[in-house]
Image (cartoon, grey):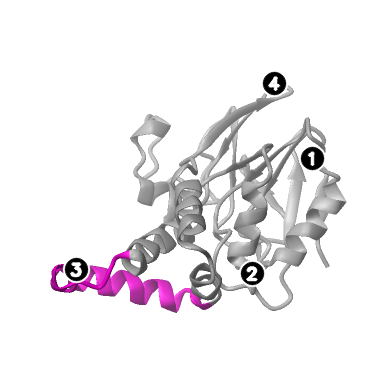
Amino acid sequence: MTYVISDIHGEYDRFLEILRQIDLKEEDTLYVLGDVLDRGPHPIKTLLKLMEMPNVICIVGNHELMALDGFRFLDKPITEENVDAIDAEAIGNLADWQRNGNASTLKEYRALSPEMRREVVAFIMDFSMYEELTIAGQKYLLVHAGLGGYAPEKKIEEYSLKNLVWDRADYETKYYDDTIVITGHTPTQYIAGNPNPGRIYRHNNHIAIDCGCSMPGGRLAAICLETGEEFYTA
C-alpha cells in the first residue's frame, strides 16, 4: 500500500499514532510531503525516526529549507573570516526561521553529536522536490506546497524550488485532467469554501492533506492511495 502524510511539525507522538493506525508494513511505502521540522516538541526526534525507516520517501518542505540554512550557519566555526562573511541575507533567513517556530528544532539539533548533525543534514539534503506516481492507473503528483507560476503547458521540471515549496496551491484551478496533485503546506482549515475544515480536502484533482497538526485543534492526517481511506490522529 502507498500512504501519504505531510506537515508533522515535530509532533512525534502523533506521528507514531498515525503509523499505528495505518499499520505500515515493510512492503508499504510512506511519502512525507515536507515540514517534518519546527513548532512541535520533537522535530529532530521525528527526523531520526524517519532516518531509520527504509520504506519512507521524504519531499522537502519550506521548514527543511530554512533549517538547512540555519544548520549551516550554526555549524560554522567562529572565526574572524566567518564573522566578516555574515551578511544581511543570512541574518534575515535566520530571523524568518525563528519566526516560524525553530526553537524546538534548535534545541534538539544542538544536543546531537557533530557526526549525527552531519547525518541529519545529509538526510535532509537527499529529500526530493516532488514525486510522480501511478497507482491503479491513476497518476499522482506529490509536492509540498503547490505549483506556483502555474501554466498548463509547463513541465514539472520547469518549476522552481520556490514554486513547489513556498507557493500555495490554487485549489480553484485544476492543474491537470489526468493527474491528482497532493499537497501539504496549507492547513485545510484555511482553504476557502472547505466544507470540512481540519479534514483532508479533495477538489479539482487536488488532495490537500495538511490538517493543522501543529495548530490548536489540528490533527495529523494520512491517506492510502490504493483505497482512498483517510486516517486521523486525535
Separation of marks 4 and 3 at Cα, in angstroms? 53 Å
Q: Main secondary structure of the magenta part?
A: helix
Separation of marks 2 and 3 at Cα, in angstroms? 30 Å
Q: Amino acid at mark 2?
A: His
Secondary structure at numbered mark 2: loop
Contact between marks 4 and 3 (CB within 8 A): the answer is no
Separation of marks 1 and 2 at Cα, in angstroms? 29 Å
Up/down of 147 relative to 9, above or below: above
- Residue at image point 64% right, 63% down: 45
- Residue at image point 61% right, 43% down: 204
Front disc: 4 or 3: 3
User: Which badge, 2 or 3, comes first in the chain's sequence?
Assistant: 2
Q: Measuring from the top left, give residue 91's x and y in whole percent.
A: 26, 74
- The span shown in magenta is 76-103
Frontmost residue, 111 versus 89:
111
- Residue at image point 53% right, 65% down: 112
Q: Which residue is mark 2?
A: 42
User: Which badge, 2 or 4, comes first in the chain's sequence?
Assistant: 2
Q: Residues within 10 Å of mark 4 (few under 14, many from 20)?
A: few
Q: Amino acid at mark 1?
A: Gly
Separation of marks 1 and 3 at Cα, in angstroms? 51 Å
Q: Which residue is mark 3?
A: 82
Front disc: 2 or 4: 2
User: Which badge, 1 or 3, comes first in the chain's sequence?
Assistant: 3
Up/down of 175 relative to 161, above or below: above
Q: Which mark is residue 228?
A: 1
